[in-house]
Amino acid sequence: MISSLDALFSALSLERIRWCTISKEELSKCTDMSTAFAGAGILPPVECMEGGSTANCTQMIKDDLADAVTLGGRSIYQAGKEHGLKPVVGEVYDQGIGTSYYAVAVVRKSSNITINSLRGARSCHTGINRTAGWNVPVGYLIDSGHLSAMGCDLPKAVSDYFSASCVPGANSTDYPESLCQLCNGDSSGQNKCEANSQEQYYGYSGAFRCLAEGAGEVAFVKHSTVPENTDGKTLSLWAQKLRSSDFQLLCRNGSRADVTEWRTCHLARIPARAVVVRPDTDGTVIFQLLNQGQQIFSGTGARFQLFDSAAYGAQNLLFRDSTTELMAITTQSYQAWLGDEYLHAMQAVSCDPNTLPETLIWCVISTEEIWKCSEMSVAFQKKNLTPAIQCLSADTKEECMELIQEKESDAVALGGADIYTAGKTYGLVPAAGENYAADDNSNGYYAVALVKRNHSNAFTISDLKGKKSCHTGLGRTAGWNIPIGMLIKRGMIRPRDCNIPQAVSEFFSASCVPSAEQDNYPSKLCELCIGDDNGNNKCSASSQERYYSYSGAFRCLAQDSGDVAFVKHSTVFENTDGNNTDSWARNLKSGDFQLLCPNGARAEVTQFAECHLGRVPAQAVMVHPDINVFAIYGLLDNAQDFFGNSSNENGFNMFDSSAFNGKDLVFKDSAVEIVPVKERRTYAEWLGSEYIESLEGMQTPSCSRAAAITTNGAVLLTSSVLLTTATTS
């Protein structure tokens, strides 16, 4: 029965395929499959192994005690992540969508709930730990930062997030009472919250019924649930008058859509089950074996049925009974098979309390910071926040990065250039970030090139050579590192021998770069500076230089000393339209200024989100990639409920360092909240391509040493020095 010589030779590369089974019924069906395949001459022979559970089977395969097992999505994730197993054959279901289905959130059309306003709603779930009803929605809400779980306690997090729920199966003392509050039980009110059909709100139809009957306001089900239970498709009395048009789906982007639009509006595509094997196993052999098997044993009349388990008194043995065919998986990686939406939800929901460290070792670098960190540790402990904080002192931020890389420390809060080093050199990842304005989700600010509106001379960013420039200060982020780094990266400024200050002085005709008044620095970098009222302290990096910092660089432009000012996006608003009453700014109008965009256009100053040189990222808490980032955010999010604002009465403020004789200790004093990283999971995603471009622009190929070097009496400022000074802007 072998279909080709190729199949024969491939089959001979595996003497037998040891199939792992997870129940006695499955073992019985596997034994019949082995006999049927052998009788049909299908090679290699199948040998059935007793695993007893999916976890045992994946361990046996890893240990070369078995070769293959069929797993569902979450088990595929765990087998891939923990044991490196790969999916090679996938199930296909007759749903018009092939190898998957979709998890959706359904609401009544008459409600005004969106995915962003779910907090406090009443929720209906198919059952505890079920895919579409629990794992995906809870994982999505955690991953997207809507919900935080301290100590990986997901049931408590869900209980705190929704006002009441029905989660069948969450009826033991291990679970918060509110998770069963909406459940109905059977017709006599018995068996409430049981994970079976005696609970009227159990399963897909039950969770939808919970919504339809008004017990809940949102139901987490699969894409086909609403069509199957409305418009006369079911005989159930509770559903006979329901119309699908009375319900809508919640989309990830905050919008809503008709229930027919699940392909584009869903929480995640849930992958089909798949056969997984060791990474060194030839997947084509497994597929050729099963492909021959399905051609012979999936039609009517065959003595053995590959996709039917009724003869064994059970369901979905070896393969789902609803499988219509098996297909070869070409990209044999668990990540590709699961897809990003499902993968990220699983990463968030696979938070195991037993894998969390009892203490989180926080790295700090000064006496004042140790002092504040110690106070934070005590304050958190008093509120039973977990894991507990322990403080570890290092000499430098880079030493903290090294300690975390070596797993001798767990977390450190870092700014932009340090985040770059932590990610690129030490492999660290962001676990949480800071936000500096309650109504701003950008987690940072924008560096912009500001010019006067000029119809007769509307030069662009490509015309900057020979212009006069105003900067906040040497080595500062928005005023120096980002604009100069970008101009270098684009090849407009070309440093020789790492001498960036000299190259800048040759590019602009004159500048004011406060603090550039140093020996051997080009005098043109200070030419536009004006010092104090008496003309003293010219080009100093202090308020005595009237053109210093954001407002100063803007004043340099406003008073026509310069043609362009490199500042942050809010500078123009803070100093115009009556917001600055100093004599030089009193009559300035924001509409008299424009931005230079990297694409060569000009834009209005209000369009900074689309027209800027770089987004300057907020500080982030950086951790080893093995640390559970959701547990870190869960701790800090719960902590800021107690210690996150200046008016709290708990005796400690996360965002105030004044009591410790310092500034920006552990967290920045200007932070108003700790925020989740959401989709910005890597250092590169947190920083953004524009910011990285500016940093790498400063790192000209010949400038890689981490120090200022002196050659023949000339100071040459290397990129690394500029990066380490980029803590403020």
Image (cartoon, grey):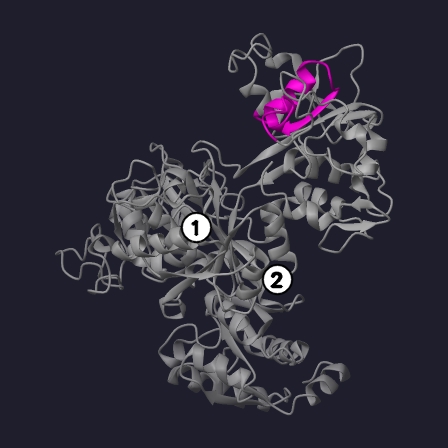
Identify the secondary structure beneath mark 1. helix
* In the depicted structure, whether residue 650 falls above or below residue 509: below
Going by the numbered disc 1, the residue's amino acid type is Glu
Identify the secondary structure beneath mark 2. loop
Return the x and y of residue 355 as percentages of the image width and height. Answer: 40, 70
551 is within the stretch colored magenta = yes
Return the x and y of residue 576 as percentages of the image width and height. Answer: 57, 14
Image: magenta residue range: 542-570
Of residues 310 and 650, which is closer to you in this image?
Answer: 650
Identify which residue is drawn at 61% across, 75% down: 295
Name the side, left or right, on which 150 lies relative to 588: left
Mark 1 or 2: in front is 1
* In the depicted structure, whether residue 395 falls above or below residue 109: below
Which residue of the protein is positioned furthest toward the top in this rendering?
587
Of residues 461 and 685, which is closer to you in this image?
Answer: 461
How many residues crowd around disc 2 within 10 Å: few (fewer than 14), some, or many (20 or more)?
some
Identify which residue is drawn at 65% across, 80% down: 280
Residue 194 in view in this figure:
yes
Going by the numbered disc 2, the residue's amino acid type is Tyr
Q: Which residue is mark 1?
A: 368
